[in-house]
Amino acid sequence: MHVLKGMKLIAAFAALVGSGVAQAGPQVTVVFKNNGSSEAVYSPVDSHETLTRSFAKSAPRAAVPKGETDSYVIQGRLSPDASHAFVRYRIGNKVCRFKSTYVMTATRSARVPKWIKEATASGGARCDARIISVNNATHAWTVEFVMR
């Protein structure tokens, strides 16, 4: 009896772990370009930014020297229909908050993928975000964030 309960418990755990892997959303490759006058510091503040860092396959560099680029991959784990990258960089008082999201939307007749990008500047920063590529088969995408 105890062996049967143990086997059921192991099977249930394996099913949960397996379903978690199947729930992964598409990955986003983030390309951050520091076109500013000095080093840009990666500085996550809110829960979305912290979650993004925890989903990174390789962590973003803590600091990106002026004129350099950092690239990393974020693999969403919450839903196959949504994924995101929320990052924040700081150069002195200048701050850029970047975000890019993927959402599978439903219409009456079809499911349609949608990719969104946004850059919010403060402290005199100039920030740009653009989606530079999309894989229509896997829905993975590459977004470029530029700070000046």
Image (tube, grey):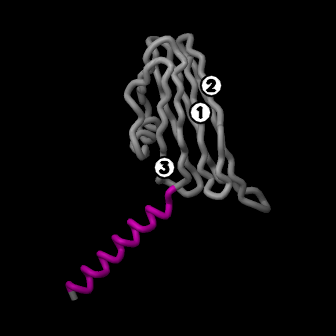
| Element under disc 3 | strand
Specify start and end residues of the magenta stretch as a single range. 2-24
For label 3, count other residues whose C-alpha is less than 10 Å away and answer few (under 14), some (14-19) or many (20+): many
The image shows residue 46, relative to residue 11, as above or below, that is above
The numbered disc on residue 75 is 3
* The one of 123 and 26 positioned closer to us in this rendering: 26
Q: Say left or right for 147 vs 111.
A: left
Question: Circle 2 sits on which residue?
Answer: 128
Q: Viewer-nearest of labels 2 and 1?
A: 1
User: Which residue is found at the position 41% from the left and 39% from the top?
Assistant: 53
Q: Viewer-nearest of labels 3 and 1?
A: 1
Residue type at mark 1? Glu
x, y (%) of residue 139?
A: 62, 53
The image shows residue 84, relative to residue 32, as above or below, that is below
Question: Circle 1 sits on which residue?
Answer: 144
| Element under disc 2 | strand
Q: CA distance from mark 2 to mark 3?
A: 22 Å
x, y (%) of residue 77?
A: 47, 53
Q: Are marks 2 and 1 in contact (CB under 8 Å)?
A: yes
Q: Specify whether residue 81 is painted magenta.
A: no
